[in-house]
Amino acid sequence: MTTKYFRWFPAWAALLLMAASHVIAASPPARGELDPEIRAFVQEMTDKHGFDRAVLEKAFRETRHLGSIIRAMDAPATALPWHEFRLRHITDARIKAGLQFWTEHQAVLEKAAAEFRVPPEMIVATIGVETLFGRLTGTIGVLDALTTLAFGYPRRAEFFRNELEQYLLLARENGIALNSLKGSFAGAIGVPQFMPSSYRKYAVDFDGDGVRDLRRVADAIGSVANYYRHFGWREGEQVIVPVDVGDTVLDAMLAAGIAPHLAVAEFRKRGIVPLEPAPEEMLATLFTVKSEAGPRYWLGLNNFYVITRYNRSINYAMAVHELATSLRRQRSASRAGP
């Protein structure tokens, strides 16, 4: 639309048309049309996995591009300072709900702990942080979420295209209609919020009905335990150790990543003093969180790293660990009696 056109066109009508053209330009292809990238993806899935092209094209024509998902991805809650993130997850109400969940599902939790060697409080806390013990499993179509991110979020498009591929396979394997399953804005599914690739790799049929259904609590409990075991949870070991860093220059150590890489004894030599006992030979990494009083420092051990395999956020891993610790402490106190 040219400038000359607006010289005689009514101003109010011109503004309306400008707004409409902006919306059209910013929107994905209209329903009934497939984006060329999606069409190419459908062809790849047809060639690689033998999907019915017409079935996939119909499913993708019915998907919605959700701008709210992109905004949520760019402002994750895990990016908050630790003291703010903690307030959302470590509450009296959540601890009470966790204790109730533990009591209701005690037999299944004990079975999972015995089989996978992961403590019940870790399973309960993970489900508590993820979905408030199965109460908030997501209301967004998984296909909508994954398609939006695979083709509308370039920064992580490769990751989400893989997850979209895994979702198509998962749905076919389990007889799930592609547009029927609901989940998180990132496409995570069920009580434990597994991404489709994790669902296919680590979900287990823990109630013995022949189906791995993460919408069911028993399968969710077994699957969380299996996930942690696969990534190397070590029964009975510590998770984190608070430290005094003194005046030590920390930049290089903090930049080394979250994977344990130096022995506790080596950190001690560098001026990082553990405030609780920890095996000197155990590998650890140094990390920091933002508290209201300023930065706090910890050594993260193997089991802390394992929690970050569930979610890469340090805040997330801290919340799961602290919730698990609170649950274990309060459950033990209540069972001990007055």
Image (spheres, grey):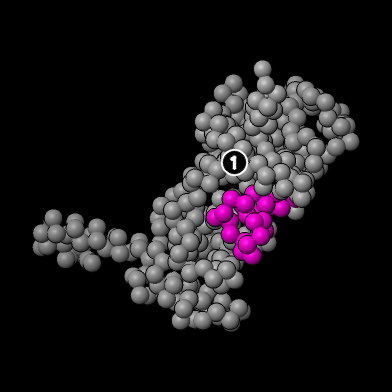
Residue 259 or 11: which is nearer the viewer? 259
* Residue 223 to residue 240: above or below: below
In the visual, does 3 lie left or right of 138? left
* Residue 167 to residue 139: above or below: below
* Residue 217 to residue 102: above or below: below
**Amino acid type shown at disc 1:** Glu
Residue found 35% across the figure and 75% down from its top: 32
Residue found 13% across the figure and 56% down from its top: 11
Residue projecting furthest to the right: 281
Q: Quadrant of residue 285?
A: top right
Find residue 277 and report its horizontal and vertical position in percent.
83, 26
Quadrant showing the N terminus: bottom left
User: What is the span of residues highlighted in magenta in the rendered image?
Assistant: 204-229
Quadrant showing the C terminus: top right
Residue found 56% across the figure and 61% down from its top: 160
Q: Residue 167: within the magenta?
A: no
- Read off the residue under disc 1: 104
Residue 61 or 297: which is nearer the viewer? 61
